[in-house]
Image (tube, rainbow, N blue to C red):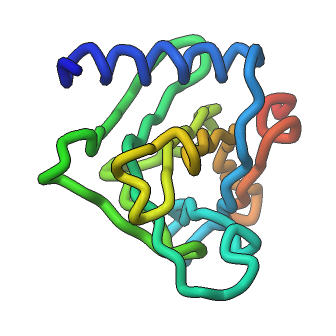
Amino acid sequence: MNKNLLRDLLLIFLVILVNGCISGYTPDIVLKKDGQPCISIPADEDFFRRQKEFNILGLDIFQTGVGELWSRHYLDSKDHYYVKNQQCLYFNYKFQTNILYDIGFFSTEKGDEENRKSTKKVWMRYMRIIKKSDGTLQLLLDEQARDYY
């Protein structure tokens, strides 16, 4: 399949997810000391603690009302990106305060390259980083992030 066509299909699928037509899985997001988020696959994805690895197929960042801000896709078999659960994903993007972001990524379990459908998961979550009156940063997720004014 054409690489650009596959990328476009992934983007369309993410847009459908953003609009709520399909439900996805919820990644863990915590704020690191540097004020940037650590976005990861939750611990319970490796229920039997087998040190399972996940192949990340694509990463996307959208700003609500604006559109795509950043994306990276690893669809080429020579360009795999593997992580373990609870390992921060590498989003090469500087997140700013008081912006509603929609974070998304696709994963399969490592070793499922032939039949990506069996373990493919779409991960999505809303987040916003706010600066409180005392100067500290706070991470807001999902409804709390969407409803913040």
Tell which residue pokes out farthest to the front in this image: 114
Q: Position of residue 120 (x, y in %)?
A: 55, 44
- Above or below for 80 versus 74: below
- Above or below for 44 versus 10: below
In this rendered view, identify the residue nearer to me: 104 or 13: 13
87 vs 69, left or right, is right
* Location of residue 124 (image quadrant): top right
Which residue lies at the image location 60% right of the left edge and 20% below the top edge? Answer: 64
Q: Position of residue 66 (x, y in %)?
A: 50, 13
Which residue lies at the image location 69% right of the left edge and 61% below the top edge? Answer: 28
Q: Position of residue 101 (x, y in %)?
A: 59, 34
- Quadrant of the snapshot with the C terminus: top right
- Above or below for 47 versus 112: below
**Count of marks overlaid on the render:** 0
Q: Position of residue 109 (x, y in %)?
A: 50, 61
* Location of residue 102 (image quadrant): top right
126 vs 39, left or right, is right
In this rendered view, identify the residue nearer to me: 88 or 30: 88
Tell which residue pokes out farthest to the left in this image: 78
- Above or below for 93 versus 60: below
9 vs 64, left or right, is left
Which residue lies at the image location 39% right of the left edge and 64% below the top edge? Answer: 111
In this rendered view, identify the residue nearer to me: 67 or 58: 58
- Quadrant of the snapshot with the N terminus: top left
In this rendered view, identify the residue nearer to me: 35 or 5: 5
Which residue lies at the image location 66% right of the left edge and 60% below the top edge? Answer: 29
